[in-house]
Amino acid sequence: MTTDMSELADVLARRAKVAGGRAVETIPVILALADAAARLAAFVAQPSADGSHGAYVGAANSDGDAQRKLDLVAEEICQAAARASGVGPYLSEETEAALTLDPAGALAMAIDPLDGSSNIAVNGVIGTIFALLPAPPGSLATPALAFAQPGHAVIASGFFMYGPQTRLVVSLGAGVDIFALDPDTGRFVLFESAATVPAGGREFAINASNARHWAAPVRRYIDACLEGADGPRGVDFNMRWAGSMVADVYRLLGRGGVFLYPSDARSNYAQGRLRLVYEAFPMAFLIEQAGGRAIDGHDRILDLTPSRPHQRIPLILGEAEEVEVLRRLHADDLGAPSEGPASRRGAA
Ligand code: AFP
């Protein structure tokens, strides 16, 4: 299917004018990714009698996760689009180390080509998450340097969501726009502009099966939500957990609420599950552009500087007011005996 990028290109050009800086340089890359996403959406939609799309194939990725067929297809399609649009340093969940694609590339791309892949086998929503950053001096020779920048270096970010519709949520630093792919015309049409995270959503997204492993601040927050109108919040809350971050974060845009993937006491979860560079940074940039906030429990995500490309980070994002409640609970907990993982500061 050929994709018609004219409307997407026009809107991005207008946003880049408002955003200024290097935003305009990201447009060709985002258009190339949109074309890649349209092809990936078509691939995902193909009937697969034996569920082979979700079949495990190939070696494990940097995380040790067995890679599924679609993960590999998504990586190939996204990496080719990045290379074709002049991206220099490139880091993907599916690449062990950072690569240099275009030896003269001025932009770096951090990407999770297929987030939520455990949902493939159940026909759930999956997505592609990306962030675009400047390629700092020396990073074409040493691409890892591009992914040692603090989150506020992000110039643009977004995610594609492969669900009942294929949608693109994107920001160049001048607010958040949502596009929908019209499968009949191959056009990405503007679905919503200036998307926001409204206050008062009264909805939280967390994998509640891990409750016994949570640190005290998260347990206090969730317990208060569960007590609802009978408890300190004085109002009932709803819960959602799609097991696919693109779906859970998309819901915040328009419905409000808060998403949490905190650290917990399970082994390997001391820094949560999500990756700082190609999951937390892109989502934090978007949510802040939509008027929300994103923290690791204490600090603003976009103020963090990665120590390793595939570093994990606890992630709390959504409505500014709810994130502030959680930040205060974590601050009050500092120094108090933590019943969960070693407390963040002062731990051995
Ligand atoms: P997969 O890509 O392995 O399916 O992981 C998806 C994800 O990184 C993120 O999209 C979800 O929010 C989170 O993991 C779900 O984690 P749990 O399975 O522990 O709930």
Image: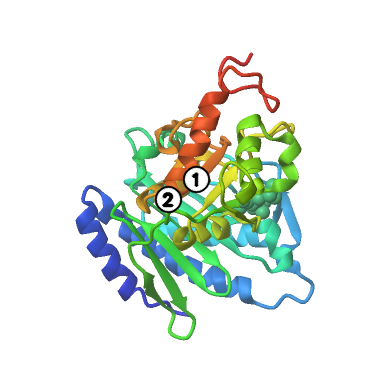
Observer able to see residue 100: no
176 lies above or below 259: below
Is tag 2's residue or tag 1's residue first in the polypeptide sequence?
Answer: 2
Mark 1 element type = strand
* Residue 218 screen position, x and y as percent: 62, 36
Please name the residue that numbered disc 2 is placed on.
287
Residue under the image location 49 percent in, 34 percent down: 327
Q: Position of residue 322 (x, y in %)?
A: 49, 44
- The verdict on label 2 being within 8 Å of ligand 1 is no
Q: Of 126 and 102, which appears nearest the observer?
A: 126
Which amino acid type is marked by label 1?
Leu
Q: Horizontal and vertical percent for residue 154? A: 37, 44
Side (left or right) of 270 relative to 185: right
Nearer to us in this view, 290 or 11: 290
| Residue identifier under label 1 | 317
Residue type indicated by callout 2: Ile
Q: Is mark 1 within 8 Å of ligand 1?
A: no
Q: Is residue 296 above or below residue 112?
A: above
Instruction: Please state, as top left, top right, bottom left or bottom right, where the C terminus lies in the image.
Output: top right
